[in-house]
């Protein structure tokens, strides 16, 4: 940084290493690398994207696997209303709706869920006015079925800045305010390109489609070579002269057509003394390494480990591929927090109010662990959870009914709602002092009549 002699602002000089070679042409107009340039590809070739997703299993897996892994174990609510919320999720197919929305967003670069309620579409959705039973349906729509109108490019304080104010379903005239539509994100684009793309994101499949094509074409080429692994060669005297005469073509063709049929059917080859038969074999050495390199490149482009995308065991002594899977699960966990959580919380604002009648304070959810533990790991985790629960119970931080509800949500011990109701009644009686009184009364009764069993009348026993 140098000070300008004219008294202006300091000038910043930006330079590279400055190394050039006139003999080889490095960093001159003769340098071949100077012509390397990234160019924009086809952004909206939806027909090819659809064909790849439907016809090719690698392309489908690139879209489906991250979405399935992100939503397979689903989520858990730590609330007394968790059972009612879970039933509502099943009733409206929230898990399936989320999967469909994110898969089509990955293919097309844009999709979402239309929340159909009892409020008019052309006005902003007011979640505080959602009452019990207001939600009617969750409808998945991708960008091929819905278009934006009246883009907000002037108010950066609005929630939909650089996004449309309204959507219209193709073929319809009903304006849908953006607050009724929950968008599922695709691959991110710069703001300028997102506006050019109609407010939608980029396709996740488009970014790695060329790598998929390379891997598939290489596999097809190897399969075609296998069909020609052996080539039969016959040397015939004066063959070129016979063909040049013009009247021997059909005769020669029939001659060797019959030769091929006899060799195939009877394992017999008949040749003239002046004909020589030779079989040439094609070498396939190195093709496996080429395919493996292309598979690795495709996995890198898709962001999915080979052990997950292709089902191939990791190579190397002592390498089980667990490290790659841990990195992949960390990426999935990051996507859950940055993409799936905002998406689901928008839906929960309507779903939970429509289920419970109101939104409980502090209600939140956690995504379930991505990896399935082994039996040994599961036993150790349950032991640790039981010890932690016992400590919290001794500290009187939680109540037995709360622990019982947690176990019921986990499906342990067959606990049902009636068991929890009895525990809650006992806890209330203990807080009111009635429970200790009944215990003392029962102890005195047993002491006075040590040889007499307590009455079978439930009214004379402690609850």
Image (cartoon, rainbow, N blue to C red):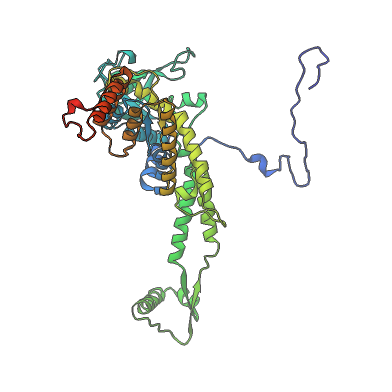
Residue 26 picture location, percent across and down: 74, 43
Q: In terms of image quadrants, where is residue 408?
A: top left
Foreground of the two, 126 or 110:
126
Q: Quadrant of residue 454?
A: top left
- Which residue: 51% across, 68% down? 282
**Does residue 423 appear to the left or right of 322 in the view shown?**
left
- The image quadrant where one finds the C terminus is top left
Residue placed most toward the observer, 78 or 6: 78
Above or below — where is 69 with respect to 10?
below
Q: For the point 48% across and 26% down, which residue is it?
A: 194
- List x then y, in percent, for residue 294: 52, 51
Is residue 24 visible to us here?
yes
Q: Is residue 147 left or right of residue 187?
A: left
* In-image side of 410 versus 281 (left or right): left
> For the N terminus, which image quadrant?
top right
Residue 257 image offset from top left, x and y in percent: 37, 75
Which residue appears at 73% of the width and 40% of the height? 27
Q: Is residue 348 above or below residue 281?
A: above
């Amino acid at each position: 940084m140098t000070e300008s002699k004219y008294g202006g602002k300091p000038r910043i000089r930006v330079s590279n290493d400055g190394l050039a070679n006139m003999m080889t042409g490095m960093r001159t107009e003769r340098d071949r690398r100077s012509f390397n340039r990234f160019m924009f590809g086809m952004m909206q070739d939806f027909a090819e994207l659809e064909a790849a997703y439907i016809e090719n299993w690698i392309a489908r897996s690139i879209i489906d696997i991250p979405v399935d892994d992100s939503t397979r174990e689903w989520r858990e609510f730590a609330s007394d209303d968790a059972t009612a919320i879970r039933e509502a999720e099943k009733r409206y197919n929230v898990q399936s709706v989320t999967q469909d929305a994110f898969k089509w967003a990955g293919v097309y670069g844009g999709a979402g869920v239309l929340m159909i309620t009892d409020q008019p579409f052309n006005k902003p959705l007011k979640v505080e006015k959602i009452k019990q039973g207001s939600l009617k349906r969750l409808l998945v729509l991708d960008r091929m079925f819905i278009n934006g109108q009246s883009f907000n490019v002037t108010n950066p304080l609005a929630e939909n800045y650089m996004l449309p104010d309204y959507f219209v379903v193709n073929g319809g005239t009903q304006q849908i305010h953006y607050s009724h539509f929950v968008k599922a994100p695709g691959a991110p684009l710069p703001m300028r390109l997102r506006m050019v793309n109609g407010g939608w994101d980029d396709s996740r499949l488009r970014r790695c489609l060329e790598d998929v094509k390379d891997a598939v074409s290489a596999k097809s080429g190897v399969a075609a070579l296998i069909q020609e692994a052996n080539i039969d060669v016959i040397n015939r005297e004066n063959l070129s002269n016979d063909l040049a005469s013009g009247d021997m073509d059909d005769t020669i063709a029939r001659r060797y057509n019959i030769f091929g049929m006899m060799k195939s059917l009877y394992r017999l080859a008949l040749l003239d003394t002046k004909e020589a038969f030779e079989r040439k074999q094609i070498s396939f050495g190195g093709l496996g390494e080429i395919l493996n390199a292309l598979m690795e490149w495709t996995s890198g482009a898709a962001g999915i480990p080979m052990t997950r995308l292709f089902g191939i065991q990791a190579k190397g002594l002592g390498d089980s591929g667990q490290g790659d899977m841990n990195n992949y699960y960390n990426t999935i966990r990051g996507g859950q927090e940055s993409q799936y959580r905002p998406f689901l919380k928008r839906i929960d604002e309507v779903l939970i109010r429509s289920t419970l009648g109101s939104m409980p304070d502090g209600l939140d959810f956690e995504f379930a662990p991505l990896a399935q533990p082994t039996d040994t790991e599961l036993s150790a985790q349950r032991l640790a959870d039981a010890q932690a629960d016992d400590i919290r119970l001794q500290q009187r931080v939680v109540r037995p009914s709360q622990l019982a509800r947690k176990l019921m949500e986990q499906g342990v011990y067959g606990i049902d709602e009636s068991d929890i109701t009895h525990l809650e009644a006992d806890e209330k009686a203990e807080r009111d002092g009635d429970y200790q009184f009944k215990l003392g009364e029962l102890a005195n009764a047993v002491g006075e009549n040590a040889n007499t069993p307590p009455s079978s009348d439930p009214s004379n026993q402690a609850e």
